[in-house]
Image: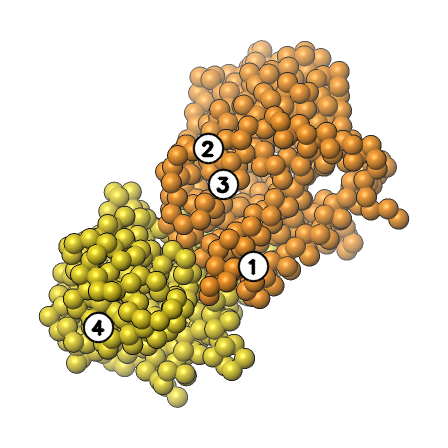
Chain colours: A yellow, B orange
Amino acid sequence: MDFTLSDERRMLQDSLSRYLADHLDHERRRKTLDSGAPYNADLYKGLADLGTLAALFPEEAGGFGGTGPDLALVFETLGRAGTLEPFLPAALAAPLLTDHADLVEQVIAGESIVTLAHTEPDARYDLADVTLSAKPTLNGTKTNVLFGAQATHLIVSARESGDRLDPEGISLFLVPTDAPGLTITPLTNVDGTASAQIAFTDTPAETRLGEPAQGHALLETATAHAILALSAETLGAMEAAKDLTLAYLQERQQFGRPIGTFQALQHRLADMLTEIEQARSAVLNLAGHLDAPRDIRERHVSATKNLVGRVAALVAEEAVQMHGGIGMTEEYELSHHARRLVMADHLFGDVDHHLERFIHLSGG
Amino acid sequence: MDLSFTQAEQDFQQEVRDFLATSLPHDLSEKVRLNKRLGKDDYQRWHAILNDKGWLAPGWPVEHGGAGWSPVQKHIFEDEACLAHAPRTVPFGITMLAPVLLAFGTEAQVARYLPRILSGEDWWCQGYSEPGAGSDLASLKTRAVRDGDHYIVNGQKTWTTLGQHANKIFCLVRTDPDAKKQEGISFLLIDMDTPGVTLRPITLIDGQPEVNEVFFDDVRVPAENLVGEENKGWTYAKYLLTHERTNIAGVGFSNAALATVKRVASEVTSGGKPLAQNPFFAARLAQVEIDLMAMATTNLRILAAAEAGRAPGPESSMLKLKGTIIRQELTSLLRRALGPHALPHQPDFLDGGDNAETLGHEQAPGAAANYFNMRKLSIFGGSNEIQRTIVAKSVLGG
């Protein structure tokens, strides 16, 4: 067993951490949010130049990473710093763009944004629940499209055959966002991240990714990458919340002593630290099995998303509680991490969805 | 043993239901039902409707314009008002200050302030918490120094709920810095428009300026605004806090929230079926409902004891603990029930009128905001850690 990082990965993590420490802090993050911009374009470009996006793509696609451990270390570092920039769409798209080297090059350079348009208004978290039709043009509505209003390209899941909920019959199409028939409604999520609702009216479906009607397996693969990335990002946010809480317990005085000397709070902190280590192990489990056969990989996908979702909510709620009123304020950094930790559960399936899926995948 | 209300109580419950059905404006109840944001006008409309009926001040004596209700009647009204999605009445004047004035104030103070609370002319806010104090309330530092017929007040209060709407604030101030922590505190009434009073809104985790900081810079307060005796304010503060803790269980709020979660779970689908049929979600929901059923009875047991004249002991702390845990879990379940629709922040809908449209389910815009806002329940009014300490001390001593 070896849980140490390779020299190359350690170098990437170091340079990424240093760059974020120099260019992003809570005040600058709030300034971006207050400006109405979905993210800081200069920061995104700087991080792209550092190779952050290239680390999400395998060598054969023009990157220098793309493995589970690459995704885990990049996103944990991004999450710890509270970045708002559109890295998650790239992690989602990376496994789907193997035949589009030019586009990958632009994504890696931070010049194009490719995002997945999959969730439908009545579909909740089921990957097979697709009603947007492709016969032959695209008609229907997608919601929760991450950075949908900023993207240059969409990967759209659409039904070519079969009934609603049928895993067979779904295809993926690459659609530029300047294609005809798109109505894009930009949205800001509760945690400050950008998304959009997109309606398709007779939008041409010219570029198919993969085989016709075989898109479900690709969706699973892309979602596995996204869940690893998001889980690692929330692990980073947990670390940030933990650091803030630890400092607060040591400096905040009440009844004449630091509140960290109260056993009630010590025990809560101990539980929180223990659970965060559980989350770290769950992220490692998925990182190590991202390229495993489908059955093995998907059990780890659901196990990790369930465990990380449980721990993320616990860390958010406990950190706010241990801070008291100050943890409830918009001005203070903790509330931003708390919102991200809680709302991440609503992306790619929540704790209940993945608990049910895990039982199903385990033969239950 | 008979767990049901008496006939007289059931008649009262029906009377309350009839009143709510005819008198609660639909647009107001819709705002409450959808967790939209209430403005000052919204609160004042409902305040005036209740006052016209004589039901605004449940616990005040009838001769002062109160309803003179028993603890069980108060409970029935709260429960029904919550289920009907009535706005809450702002408690600072009615259930916090008024009982203190009736018990410890001068005749002149009672005669002056109580009618103005009922009429809505005065909107009171609470000046208890300070930045360094938190649950250690007695460590407050705001100073009041006697200067002839006035006190000169300097200091800062925080977490002043809805202070942006208030024209009056009741404050705990330190009048004897040399006395022991609890012994040098006085209870003072201050006009918000006195020179030297400034207010700064604090935006909370849900994006709303619900609370404020209030600064006092050489504020001159007439000495007649002192309640009771100088340096005895801690006694009055404790009296007020026991009144604040009535209805801390929030059974009515939880019943209403449970009904909302059930409705949403029957309306949204998961895997092509109503979410209510999903065994995982159904199990979570059932567990909260079971806890709530028991807690409602714990609440009634304590009410019955209060009607029989027995003072509540640590049970009020237990109610606060269990009640807030259940309410928070219900906000969490509503957020989960909405799934991906809970993600977008939709301020136009939350602040807007009846015509603002929502993406996804009608409960979607308010669900996450309300979940985050309700994290306060386990922090304010003495944090849940403080309540656990009270419960433990009641059996262990110390």
**Viewer-side residue, A49 vs B254:** B254
Q: Amino acid at mark 3?
A: Asn
Considering only order in the chain, which callout, 1 or 2, is on the residue closer to the N terminus?
2
Where residue A294 sits in the image (x, y, percent)?
A: 37, 82
Tell me which chain the residue with mark 1 is part of.
B
A352 with respect to A4 (left or right):
right
- Residue at numbered disc 3: B35
Q: CA distance from mark 2 to mark 4?
A: 56 Å
Could you tell me residue B172's position as x and y percent? 59, 29
Earlier sequence position, callout 2 versus callout 3: 3
> Mark 4 and mark 1, same subunit?
no
**Callout count:** 4
| Nearer to us: label 2 or label 3 | 3
Question: How far is mark 3 from mark 1, CA to CA?
Answer: 22 Å
Category of crowding for the residue at label 3, using alpha-carbon neighbours closer than 10 angstroms: few (below 14), some (14–19), many (at least 20): some
Secondary structure found at label 3: loop
Mark 4 vs mark 3: tell me if same chain: no
Q: Residue at x 54, y 55 (%)?
A: B266
Identify the disc placed on residue A324.
none
Q: Which residue is mark 2?
A: B213
Give the chain letter at badge 3: B
Q: Which residue is identified by label 4? A: A209
Q: Are marks 4 and 1 in contact (CB under 8 Å)?
A: no
Label 2: few (<14), some (14–19) or many (≥20) C-alpha neighbours in 10 Å: many
Which label number is shown at residue B276? 1
Q: Quadrant of the C terminus of chain A?
A: bottom right
Separation of disc 2 and disc 3 at Cα? 25 Å
